[in-house]
Image: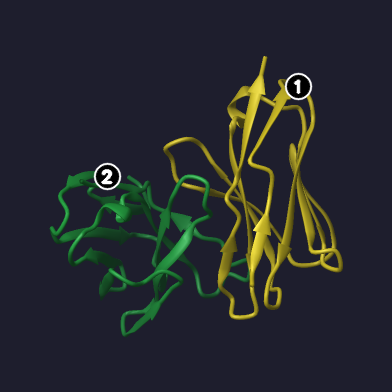
Amino acid sequence: GQNIDQPTEMTATEGAIVQINCTYQTSGFNGLFWYQQHAGEAPTFLSYNVLDGLEEKGRFSSFLSRSKGYSYLLLKELQMKDSASYLCACMDSNYQLIWGAGTKLIIKP
Amino acid sequence: DADVTQTPRNRITKTGKRIMLECSQTKGHDRMYWYRQDPGLGLRLIYYSFDVKDINKGEISDGYSVSRQAQAKFSLSLESAIPNQTALYFCATSDQGAHTGELFFGEGSRLTVL
């Protein structure tokens, strides 16, 4: 079956760096997405990786290893507003998105 | 104004009632989706539509139906609501031409079935 695994919750300190991991098993692969979702709000797009390697976008970076079925989202210089859930999603061979349950990130002062 | 608008934002209803959730978008996207979100679970696809004449079942379509009235409008119906349909429902759109397949979500409709 198809599966996306990511930690349920993580805690980090303001100003620090945090890495949120995601592993996936899907029927085919057409890209991996990270979305941010603040409590009670809609998910918003953060990044898309389809090739191996690191994509950097400001304080956020996303990494993909297709051979390992693994991705991570790296958040630097954490700010209180980064407290949110981070959703990993993988696009399968039918171009359907398979979603992880999300990682709730708690930022402490 | 939001590009993807859902109504109602909150609804409490009783078992057996018919409920319609509406979604409209001003992004000009052809593709529209309905998802539900439950605590501890990933987003699950209910139905999706790639254009006005196209309707496709998603992972969990049982107990739901949809209507694509126009390019900009996609409504979700629960013919006879049951308590396990209590969830947060999201409408989303995407651009067929965008290689990333990025989704744009509405603000969500919280449905409680008593």
The picture quadrant where one finds residue B29 is bottom left
Number of other residues with Cα within 10 Å of mark 2, as a class: few under 14, some 14 to 19, many 20 or more: some
Q: In the rendered structure, which amino acid carries the disc numbered 2?
A: Arg
Left or right placement of residue B77 versus residue A5 in this view: left
- Residue B107 in the image: state x and y as whole percent: 37, 46
Q: Between residue A3 and residue B24, name the one nearer to us.
A: A3
- Labelled disc at residue B87: none
Subunit of label 2 = B
Q: Quadrant of residue B22?
A: bottom left
The image shows residue B5 at horizontal and vertical percentages of 31, 52
Q: Which chain is green?
A: B
Residue pictured at 44% horizontal, 49% vertical: B38
Up-down relation of residue A24 to residue B49 (above or below): above
Q: Secondary structure at mark 2?
A: loop
Q: Is residue A34 left or right of residue B38?
A: right
According to the picture, the residue beneath numbered tag 1 turns out to be: A15
Q: Position of residue B30 (x, y in %)?
A: 41, 73
Q: Residue at x 27, y 44 (%)?
A: B9
Name the residue: 43% across, 73% down.
B58
Amino acid under label 1? Gly
Instruction: From this view, report whether residue A91 is shown above or below residue A71.
Output: below
Residue assigned mark 2: B9
**Residue B55 picture quarter:** bottom left
Per the rendering, the colour in which chain A appears is: yellow
Tell me the quadrant of the picture where the N terminus of chain A can be found. bottom right
Residue B98 location (% of width, % of height): 58, 69
